[in-house]
Amino acid sequence: MKFEISQNSLTNISAAASLVFAFEKDQSNSFAVLDKALKGVLRDAVRQENFKGKLGSVLHVHTHGKILSGKVYVLGLGKKEDLDANSLRKAFSLLAKDIKGRTGSIALEFLSKSETKVDILTQAQVISEGILLGSYEFNKYKSKDEKEKELELAVFAQIDDKNKQDVESGIKSAELFYKATRLARDLVNESAAVVTPTALSVIARDLTKENPEIKCEVYDRKDIEKMGMGAFLGVAQGSDTPPKFIYLEYSPKNPKNKTKLALVGKGITFDSGGISIKPGDSMMTMKCDMAGAAIVLGVFSVIAKVKPDFTVMGMIAATPNLISGKSLVPGDVLRAMNGKTIEILNTDAEGRVTLADSLSYAVKKGATHIIDFATLTGACMIALGQDITALFSNDRNFAEKIKDSAKLAGEKVWDMPLEEDYKDLNKSEVADIANIPSSRYGGAITAALFLEAFVDKKPWIHLDIAGPAFTEKAFDYGPKGGTGYGVRTILNLLKNW
């Protein structure tokens, strides 16, 4: 997919289709210009089709050779007063999904200041992002339909020298954000037989080849044992697949900021539940249990281009959670890297156990701030549904940074409490802490409280992405499957720290 800039008007660009906008009670300036050139065809079509301009709705109109483009798409933008960057991104993603397979190129003009408060740079970014996100497909294993046309080009029309640099900057940001999101989506959508711990470690190492600011260290089973990661090894012991602990570090040449941010991703490459085995229908999508690791790798794939002026670290404890004669069983006790002991009461609560060592390692490496991403609890989905991430934090200022970054990305988060009184629910009779609580209620909270025990009071955020990491139906920004949720939020955080 390419984006181009042109000084020409829509009527003088030979794209396969031109794009204009309609609000619920009005049409855009570009609509009026093209409608005049088409001698009222657009207004007639809007009236005949009873097109209301609902956000993301698309009306297809043939031009019958009256302008260079063979078609005009009228994209609904909803109520003019409600239009913001996120709704504009959403509309263009829905457009891309609607016209997929129909056309190879489109041309459009940006909205004027009288039509929106969204500036040109932001319009360029969110429109480009929307098109890219909506065009995504994971079709590696599908036969290609040669008749389908892929959208390969979008031309931004009537861009003068004054706005050219802003438009180019917006496109560049969109392409970076999408590149990172696409990697995360691809990793989650790929089968567990392909995305093994070793495969993740190879991807991580490859990131260092063209980016001298990034270093990568990969530790195997013997190394992990020497490092004292007994919690991680306990989960890994049930599988013949070699576990890998992956450490990434981005260090700018001349850091202006002493922050050391750790990004910790849950990396369970397939989760059977272990001895506490999952029902068959709950296991079908468990290749997605490494979505947290995919966020970390997605962010690091473009971090050298984003150029934060502080150190960023990435930690992934990668292993499947499988069943064998060597698997953990309820009642086993593991010792984490920080010395705390964990009683295993349910082997399907394994993610928090591996994260215990990853978080401990982040503390050991001197992290000043820690964020973990984990498809952790079904309780989170019961509370917030499939579209919203639960945000837990021990630092309000840090939490607000993430919330602001998520808002810019159009990704939904919701504050959840770290209820002190619930800590007793994680008590164990034989160890420092149990891996599941004594009550079935408040499961997302008790899981977060478990993780908090391993961050040594550092400013920390836990994002339970169990809902939005993987969707079982098509959504506004893509098809069924991995969503890449969280990548763009973190990239916004790095840009605006």
Image (spheres, grey):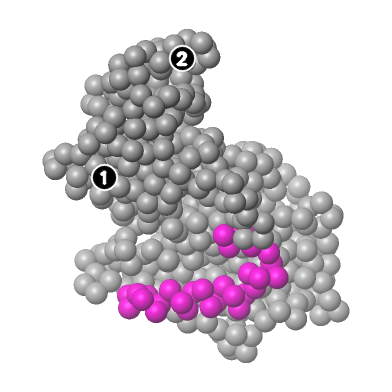
Looking at the image, which is closer to me, 453 or 464? 464
Q: Residues within 10 Å of mark 2 (few under 14, many from 20)?
A: some
- Amino acid marked by disc 2: Val
Residue 46 marker: 2
* Left/right of residue 280 with respect to residue 426 in the rendered view: right
Q: Residue at x 82, y 51 (%)?
A: 281
Tell me the element at label 2.
helix
Disc 1/disc 2 C-alpha distance (Å): 29 Å
**In the image, is residue 168 part of the stretch drawn in magenta?**
no
53 relative to 345 in the view: left or right: left
Which span of residues is magenta-colored? Answer: 186-215
The quadrant where residue 188 appears? bottom right
Locate residue 130: give its quadrant. top left
- x, y (%) of residue 371? 47, 59
Other-residue count near label 1 (Cα within 10 Å), few / some / many at <14 / 14–19 / ≥20: some
Q: Secondary structure at mark 1?
A: strand
Rendered location of residue 61, percent (x, y):
46, 24
Residue 205: say if magenta: yes
Would residue 198 be visible to someone looking at this image? yes
- Residue 223 is marked as none
Closer to the N terminus: mark 1 or mark 2?
1
- Which residue is at a point 30% across and 20% down the rendered structure image? 37
